[in-house]
Image (cartoon, helix red, strand yellow):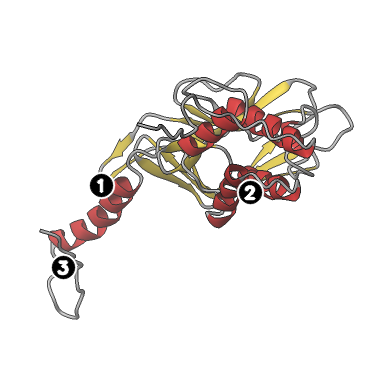
């Protein structure tokens, strides 16, 4: 049966271990059930800014291996121009056990080594000498700019069904798609869904749209593949095309029997 229960603390009442266990276990079990099947990725926050050769990762929440890691204060890292591809990532340490405490740590790193097992990418960029590192974008295509701009296309963000593209990026796509004036019901429906969910949509929906509306065929597509597919579709619509694929047998036929 379903139930809810919470401890009541009253003056002169005995504080029981079970009461403290309830405070500990309920939020943990709730979060684990809610995010089951979502995979690993950014839950909230983790914005970026750059100033005077220092890169700032803002507070946020990350879901990793069934646990929610929180960072309540900004993390600042020295970030000089090297003109090399640089990765911002979080490296998750082995679960930490102490008397009366259990937890894990995620160390924020900035180096030239691509993310490995046990690490999560938070962005990548190539900063040239004398340039400023941008963390804002002019349009959908600008998100992939190679030089002097943080690329967050590869960063996993939590959605129902698994990690996918940055919700902000998907909202920009939706707005630009509607601005093309397309009347295709699939394009309009997809764009309105993105706006209505604030960019949070199951990755499989994005993959299905890319496969049907563009030229990408694989059943499983990475964030980078999804972005390239969306960009191709957007360019096509801006040029007046439709490009929507019809599946074999998709048209109904009337048969005289």
Does residue 11 sit above or below 59 in this rendering? below
Residue beneath disc 2: 171
- Frontmost of labels 2 and 3 is 2
State the residue at coordinates (25%, 60%).
Answer: 23
Residue beneath disc 3: 15
Across and down, in percent, residue 17 comes to 14, 59
Across and down, in percent, residue 189 comes to 57, 49
Residues at marks 3 and 1, CA–CA distance in whole angstroms: 17 Å
Q: Earlier in the sequence, mark 2 or mark 3?
A: 3
Give the residue furthest to the left: 1
Q: SS of the residue at dot 3? A: loop
Residues at marks 2 and 3, CA–CA distance in whole angstroms: 49 Å
Q: Inspect this view and state whether residue 114 appears.
A: yes
Q: Quadrant of the C terminus?
A: top left
Across and down, in percent, residue 116 comes to 50, 20
Q: Inspect this view and state whether residue 46 appears.
A: no
């Amino acid at each position: 049966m379903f139930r809810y229960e919470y401890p009541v603390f009253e003056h002169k009442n005995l504080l029981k271990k079970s009461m403290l266990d309830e405070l500990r276990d309920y939020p943990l079990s709730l979060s684990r059930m809610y995010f089951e099947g979502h995979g690993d990725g950014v839950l909230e926050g983790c914005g970026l800014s750059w100033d005077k050769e220092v890169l700032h990762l803002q507070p946020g929440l990350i879901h990793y291996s069934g646990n929610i890691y929180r960072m309540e204060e900004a993390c600042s890292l020295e970030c000089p121009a090297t003109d090399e591809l640089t990765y911002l990532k979080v490296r998750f340490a082995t679960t930490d056990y102490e008397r009366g405490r259990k937890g894990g740590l995620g160390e924020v790193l900035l180096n030239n080594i691509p993310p490995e097992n046990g690490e999560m990418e938070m962005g990548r960029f190539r900063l040239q000498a004398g340039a400023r590192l941008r963390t804002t974008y002019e349009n959908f295509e600008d998100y992939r700019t190679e030089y002097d701009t943080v690329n967050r296309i590869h960063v996993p963000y939590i959605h129902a069904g698994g990690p996918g593209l940055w919700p902000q990026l998907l909202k920009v796509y939706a707005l630009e798609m509607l601005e093309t004036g397309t009347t295709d019901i699939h394009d309009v429906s997809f764009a309105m869904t993105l706006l209505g969910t604030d960019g949070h949509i199951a990755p499989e929906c994005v993959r299905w749209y890319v496969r049907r509306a563009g030229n990408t065929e694989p059943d499983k597509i990475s964030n980078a593949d999804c972005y390239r597919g969306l960009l191709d579709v957007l360019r096509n619509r801006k040029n007046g095309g439709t490009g929507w694929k019809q599946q074999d047998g998709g048209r109904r036929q009337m048969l005289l029997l």
